[in-house]
Amino acid sequence: MKTPEPLQQIKHRRDAALGALVGGVPYINYLGVKFDRRGDELTATLPFAERLIGNPMLPALHGGATAAFLEITAIIELSWSTLWPDIEAECIDLENAPLPRLPKTIDFTVDYLRAGLPRDAYARARVNRSGRRYASVHVEAWQDNRSRLFAQATGHFLMPARDG
């Protein structure tokens, strides 16, 4: 009988896989987006930066920065949920292997519900459908109160071909 893997090794493998996935996209690093992992659930954080302000009179987050944050969250969640079974089965080691190709955006619709304030923003994505070729994802973003969204989006993505 195989002995269970120590918890710290499991956490390290999951964190390393997420770090490799996120670290492989320079624009994520440029915006400063971070991901907090709790099991298989991800929460994205867009830390406030003065350069993200689009309207200094309000001040409000730039719509493009908001849309990029939502799209990044959707793509990383979709990739994470697709890779999760392989990460858990120890079939993939993103730390030492080439990064998998990311899904490509087919369309992405953003609903701006209220102005994004000059503070940190958070987002979570939910994969509505994920098949071999196509996926649909919904994303919600908030700042101080999870129930008061400032933006939400729905995206459709072309899934990369799976090797093997």
Image: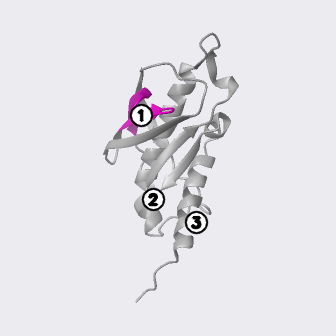
Q: Amino acid at mark 3?
A: His
- Mark number for residue 39? 2
Q: Are marks 2 and 1 in contact (CB under 8 Å)?
A: no
Rendering coords of residue 36 (x, y %): 54, 50
Badge 1 is on which residue?
Answer: 140
- Mark number for residue 12? 3
Rendered residue at 53%/26% (across/down): 66
As drawn, 3 above or below 39: below
User: Does residue 50 appear to the left or right of 113 in the view shown?
Assistant: right
What element does badge 3 sit on? helix
Is residue 44 among what the camera can see?
Answer: yes
Q: Amino acid at mark 2?
A: Gly
Would residue 23 be counted in the magenta stretch? Answer: no
**Residue most extreme to the front:** 145
Name the quadrant containing residue 18. bottom right
Rendering coords of residue 112 (x, y %): 44, 20
Front residue of 109 and 10: 10
The answer to which of marks 3 and 2 sits earlier in the sequence is 3
Circle nearer the viewer, 3 or 2:
2
Rendered residue at 42%/49% (across/down): 161
Rendered residue at 47%/56% (across/down): 38
User: Does residue 75 appear to the left or right of 12 in the view shown?
Assistant: left
Rendered residue at 53%/61% (across/down): 14
Which quadrant is the N terminus positioned in? Answer: bottom left
In three-dimensional space, the C-alpha distance between marks 2 and 1, rounded to whole angstroms, equals 19 Å
